[in-house]
C-alpha cells in the first residue's frame, strides 16, 4: 500500500467478536477505516456502527455480496466457528487479505484449504490471537527474557468460564469440539507462540461430552479439558479449558523458573473494587451476577490484547508483511492441529509425539 493510505476493512459479523475487533479499529483510525459491516441481522450492524460513531459505511446482510462489492483491503471474519473457512476462502478468491478469529476453522482440512487458497491468491491470513498482545503477558515475557526468574521450566495457562451462551458452541458440527477448541485456543496458541510451535509431545484428557460431562450434559463437546505439552528446549506446559467455573471469565497464566515465578490474572486483576446492592451494569466477561462485591474491569478489551492486535494487523497490511509468530495463518493452523491431536490423545489414552520436527 502507498504510504499515508488507510487500510480499508470489511467486518463480517457484528455480534460479540465484531465488537471486540471494532474497539481496535476505533483506536487506530490513523491507519484503518471500516468501510463496511455485514451481518444477517441488519439491526446489529446499525447498533455496532452507532456505538462507535461510524458515519460513512456500507451495510450488507449477505457476506458473498459484501465481499464481491465492497472495495476493501482486508475482510475481518468475526463469525461463528463453522463459517470461518467458507468466508475466508471466498474473500481470498476475491483478492482480499483475511483476519480470522479463533479457531481458524472447525476442521483441520478446512484450515489447510484456507492457507492453500491464500498461497494461490498471494494474500495473507492473519490469525487473531489477542493474548499475544495482552500488556501483562508482554511484560511477563520481558521479565523472563531478562532472566529474572532464571530458566523457564513450566507454564500453566487456562481459560475457563461457566459455559457459552452461543447456540453455535453447543454442537461439534458448528463449534468443532467443546471447551478445548472454544476456550483452550487462547492459552494453547499463546504457549505455542512462546516456543515458536516447537513442541515434541503432548497428552490430553477431556470430560468426553454429553452425559460424560461434569456439568453440561446437553453439550455435545467436552465441558472440561486439559492438555500437557513438552517443548524442544525441555520446557513443559499445561493448558486447561473448561465450562465449570462460575463468577466470570478466568484467564490465569503462571510461569515457573529456576529462580522465581510470575503469576498473571488477565481478567480479575482490576484495581477497582466495588460493593453494589442493585449490581453494576458490567463487571467482567461472563460474570453471572454483579451484586455485592465485584472487580469491574478497566479497559478490558485493551488489557486482553485486542486493541494492539488489530493495530499490528493494520501495520502488517500497510507494510505488506507477515504478522509476528502466533498471529500468522500457519500458527492458527498449528493450534488447530494440536487441538485435534489433543482430542485424539484423550479418546485413545495415548501420548502423541510431534512427527514434524
Image (tube, rainbow, N blue to C red):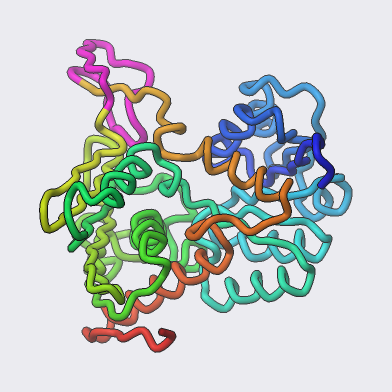
- Residue 114 pos. (x, y %): 65, 70
Residue lying at the far front in this picture: please name it.
146
Disc count in the image? 0
Q: Is residue 126 left or right of residue 4?
A: left
- Residue 208 pos. (x, y %): 26, 71
Q: Quadrant location of residue 49?
A: top right
- Residue 205 pos. (x, y %): 22, 72
Q: State the residue in front, 46 or 153.
A: 153
Q: Residue at x 23, y 86 (%)?
A: 350
Q: Residue at x 72, y 24 (%)?
A: 54
Q: Main secondary structure of the magenta part?
A: loop
Q: Residue at x 18, y 63 (%)?
A: 153
The question of residue 87 being in magenta is answered with no
Q: Which residues are magenta?
A: 270-293
Q: Is residue 310 left or right of residue 193?
A: right
In this picture, is 8 found above or below 341? Answer: above
| Residue 178 seen in the figure | no
In this picture, is 53 found above or below 38? Answer: above
Q: Quadrant location of residue 198?
A: bottom left
Q: In the rendered image, which quarter contains the C terminus?
A: bottom left
Residue lying at the far bottom in this picture: please name it.
355
- Residue 311 pos. (x, y %): 60, 39
Q: Quadrant location of residue 156?
A: bottom left
Residue lying at the far left in this picture: please name it.
259
In this picture, is 209 found above or below 166? Answer: below
Q: State the residue in front, 218 or 357.
A: 357
| Residue 282 seen in the figure | yes
Q: Residue at x 40, y 41 (%)?
A: 134
The question of residue 276 being in magenta is answered with yes
Amino acid at each position: 500500500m502507498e504510504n499515508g493510505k488507510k487500510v480499508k476493512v470489511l467486518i463480517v459479523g457484528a455480534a460479540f467478536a465484531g465488537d471486540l475487533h471494532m474497539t481496535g479499529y476505533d483506536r487506530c483510525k490513523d491507519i484503518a477505516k471500516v468501510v463496511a459491516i455485514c451481518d444477517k441481522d441488519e439491526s446489529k450492524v446499525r447498533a455496532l456502527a452507532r456505538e462507535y460513531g461510524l458515519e460513512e459505511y456500507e451495510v450488507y446482510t449477505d457476506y458473498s455480496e459484501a465481499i464481491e462489492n465492497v472495495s476493501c483491503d482486508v475482510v475481518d471474519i468475526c463469525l461463528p466457528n463453522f463459517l470461518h473457512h467458507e468466508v475466508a476462502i471466498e474473500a481470498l478468491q476475491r483478492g482480499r487479505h483475511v483476519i480470522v478469529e479463533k479457531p481458524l476453522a472447525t476442521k483441520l482440512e478446512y484450515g489447510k484449504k484456507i492457507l492453500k487458497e491464500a498461497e494461490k491468491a498471494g494474500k495473507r491470513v492473519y490469525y487473531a490471537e489477542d493474548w499475544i498482545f495482552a500488556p501483562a503477558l508482554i511484560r511477563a515475557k520481558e521479565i523472563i527474557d531478562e532472566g529474572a526468574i532464571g530458566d523457564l521450566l513450566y507454564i500453566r495457562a487456562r481459560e475457563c468460564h461457566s459455559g457459552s451462551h452461543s447456540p453455535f458452541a453447543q454442537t461439534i458440527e458448528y463449534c468443532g469440539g467443546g471447551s478445548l477448541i472454544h476456550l483452550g485456543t487462547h492459552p494453547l496458541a499463546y504457549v505455542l507462540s512462546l516456543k515458536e510451535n516447537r513442541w515434541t509431545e503432548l497428552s490430553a484428557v477431556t470430560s468426553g461430552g454429553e452425559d460424560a460431562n461434569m456439568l453440561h450434559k446437553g453439550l455435545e463437546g467436552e465441558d472440561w479439558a486439559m492438555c500437557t505439552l513438552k517443548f524442544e528446549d525441555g520446557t513443559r506446559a499445561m493448558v486447561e479449558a473448561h465450562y465449570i467455573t462460575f463468577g466470570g471469565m478466568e484467564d490465569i497464566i503462571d510461569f515457573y523458573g529456576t529462580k522465581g515465578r510470575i503469576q498473571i490474572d488477565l481478567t480479575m486483576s482490576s484495581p477497582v473494587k466495588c460493593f453494589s446492592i442493585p449490581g453494576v451494569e458490567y463487571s467482567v466477561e461472563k460474570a453471572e451476577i454483579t451484586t455485592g462485591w465485584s472487580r469491574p474491569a478497566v479497559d478490558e478489551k485493551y488489557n486482553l490484547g485486542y486493541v494492539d492486535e488489530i493495530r499490528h494487523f493494520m501495520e502488517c497490511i500497510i507494510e505488506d508483511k507477515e504478522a509476528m509468530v502466533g498471529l500468522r495463518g500457519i500458527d492458527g493452523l498449528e493450534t488447530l492441529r494440536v487441538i485435534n491431536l489433543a482430542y485424539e490423545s484423550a479418546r485413545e489414552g495415548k501420548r502423541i509425539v510431534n512427527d514434524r520436527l
